[in-house]
């Protein structure tokens, strides 16, 4: 069923600094504090009419997750494909690293999932008190935002249980999580009593952030979230606080799905695992310009409720495979920023044909053992037969440090008099931005030079751009073009 959304009458979400937050409590009814980052408080308020900074709280109905379909496998082929064994020689994951899953409830009673849940060290279980003062009573391991209680389990939840196993399952019955040494935090956001809403997603993400989680997986159909400013600002909040959010690319066999507009998360497409079609795009998987990375997502063997194991197919399965690599990288490099982890995962992925499946297919073995090469850019121009160039597109071959792209001199266009006639990136670059399009339609007749700076552009490790792709970093990318009257 197509997802529908409707504004909840009189219900709004406000992201406020402390002054605004206390002023608001005088003006409107504050229903709930949804969460906090260091300087922003997200409030759920009720008011007769919206004010300038009020964001609509939407209710969503329909099939929220990216539906998985039955797969066919009795062997975790995906672990071989991503060379998990080679990664595990370095680390199987640290128990101090926690990855969160927001989904519809898992069955952690599965024998292969014993011991995989994180434990909140500051919360005394079952005493009816919020010992750590995070607003949740007895949140020993995770939370149920859908029912509003401390039990995120759902003994029927195949989707969540399978995702949990892909990440954390202990080896057995042919199954193993990608990062079996790390811990999982199950956050139930759908399937319970409360209808799914913007505020539930916002609250669950801010909860994970506050608990120090640096990786979150959401295998949900978020196409319907485009235009939901409360959700978009929470994505940004996570990205600004060192969290990598992995989300499925979707199962509609569609190019450039709506969700690719979100630049603050990592969209994961699915590749096949069968011998004959290995590393090809799964026939169901979405793809396109904004897709960030690929991972095996077809015929993935993992845990199912009731102590069973079985294979499922979907980008819902690919997304946790990619996040598992992040948990391993995080375990090996606890001091790395989200940008560095992402640059490592993307920069060590195995390149796939074409540019529509993100940076490549994740390779855990390479991610744990290799040093990424200096960043390069790929350029395509739209030029007419008369020599007229209309636009130039820069595709990132590796992840760039968004801060380095902000410099106005990072990208410049010079005229014949060597005057800079265009400066800066045409839009803000975030970690999930994959390409930039420079529009030259307004430039008058003349000969021009487009320069991407080898001095200013860097990857998150500080390696300068290798503009001419000669293997030595630090030189510009230069493209000459003409404008004809
Ligand atoms: Ca608590
Ligand atoms: Ca307690
Ligand atoms: Ca993207
Ligand atoms: Ca070079």
Image: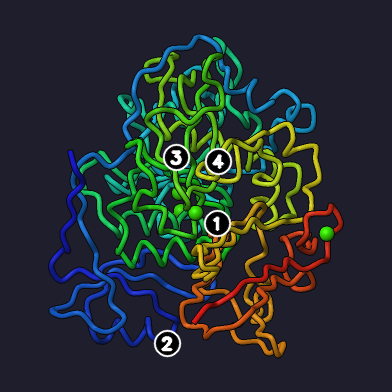
Give the CA distance from mark 1 to mark 3.
30 Å
Residue to which mark 3 is pinned: 186
**Circle 4 SS class:** loop
Q: Are marks 4 and 3 in contact (CB under 8 Å)?
A: no
Q: Where residue 300 sits in the image (x, y, percent)? A: 48, 21
**Which is more N-terminal, label 4 or label 1?**
4
Q: Is residue 191 above or below residue 390?
A: above
Mark on residue 19?
2
Q: Is residue 109 left or right of residue 457?
A: left
Q: Which residue is mark 4?
A: 354
Q: Tell me the SS state at disc 2.
A: helix
140 w.r.t. 136: above or below: above
- Residue at the spot of label 1: 434
Q: Residues within 10 Å of mark 1 (few under 14, many from 20)?
A: many
Residue 141 in sight from this viewpoint:
no
Tally of numbered tags = 4
Task: Say which element carries label 1.
Answer: loop
Is the CB–ligand 1 distance for label 3 below 8 Å?
A: no
Instruction: Quadrant for the N terminus, please.
Output: top left
């Amino acid at each position: 069923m197509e997802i529908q959304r409707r504004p909840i009458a009189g219900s709004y979400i406000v992201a406020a600094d402390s002054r605004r937050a206390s002023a608001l409590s005088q003006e409107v009814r504050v229903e709930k504090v949804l969460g906090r980052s260091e300087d922003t408080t997200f409030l759920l308020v009720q008011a007769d009419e919206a004010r300038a900074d009020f964001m609509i709280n939407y209710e969503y109905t329909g099939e929220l997750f990216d539906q998985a379909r039955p797969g066919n496998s009795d062997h975790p082929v995906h672990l071989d494909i991503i060379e998990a064994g080679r990664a595990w020689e370095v680390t199987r994951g640290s128990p101090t690293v926690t990855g969160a899953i927001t989904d519809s409830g898992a069955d952690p009673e599965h024998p292969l999932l014993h011991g995989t849940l994180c434990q909140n060290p500051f919360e005394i279980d079952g005493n009816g008190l919020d010992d750590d003062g995070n607003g949740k009573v007895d949140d020993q391991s995770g939370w149920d935002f859908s029912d509003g209680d401390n039990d995120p389990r759902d003994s029927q939840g195949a989707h969540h249980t399978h995702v949990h196993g892909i990440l954390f399952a202990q080896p057995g019955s042919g199954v193993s999580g990608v990062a079996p040494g790390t811990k999982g935090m199950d956050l139930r956001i759908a399937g319970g009593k409360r209808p799914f809403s913007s505020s539930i997603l916002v609250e669950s993400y801010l909860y994970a952030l506050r608990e120090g989680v640096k990786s979150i997986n959401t295998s949900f159909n978020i196409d319907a979230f485009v235009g939901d400013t409360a959700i978009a600002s929470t994505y940004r909040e996570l990205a600004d606080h060192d969290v990598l959010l992995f989300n499925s690319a979707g199962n509609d066999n569609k190019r450039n799905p709506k969700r690719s507009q979100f630049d603050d998360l990592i969209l994961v497409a699915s590749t096949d695992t069968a011998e004959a079609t290995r590393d090809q795009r799964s026939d169901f998987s979405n793809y396109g310009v904004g897709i960030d990375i690929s991972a095996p997502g077809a015929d993935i063997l993992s845990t199912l409720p009731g102590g069973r194991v079985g294979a499922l197919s979907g980008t819902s399965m690919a997304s946790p495979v990619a996040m598992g690599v992040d948990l391993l990288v995080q375990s090996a490099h606890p001091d790395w920023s989200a940008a560095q982890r992402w640059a490592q995962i993307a920069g060590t992925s195995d390149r796939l044909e074409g540019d529509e499946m993100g940076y490549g297919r994740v390779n855990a073995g390479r991610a744990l053992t290799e040093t990424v090469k200096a960043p390069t850019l790929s350029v395509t121009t739209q030029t007419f037969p008369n020599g007229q160039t209309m636009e130039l597109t820069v595709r990132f071959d590796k992840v760039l440090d968004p801060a380095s792209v902000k410099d106005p001199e990072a990208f410049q266009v010079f005229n014949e008099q060597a005057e800079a006639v265009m400066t800066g990136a045409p839009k803000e670059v975030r970690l999930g931005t994959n390409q930039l399009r420079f529009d030259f339609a307004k430039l008058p007749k003349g000969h021009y030079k487009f320069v991407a700076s080898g001095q200013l552009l860097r990857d998150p490790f500080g390696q300068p751009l290798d503009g001419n792709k000669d293997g030595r970093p630090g030189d510009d990318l230069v493209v000459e073009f003409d404008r004809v009257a």
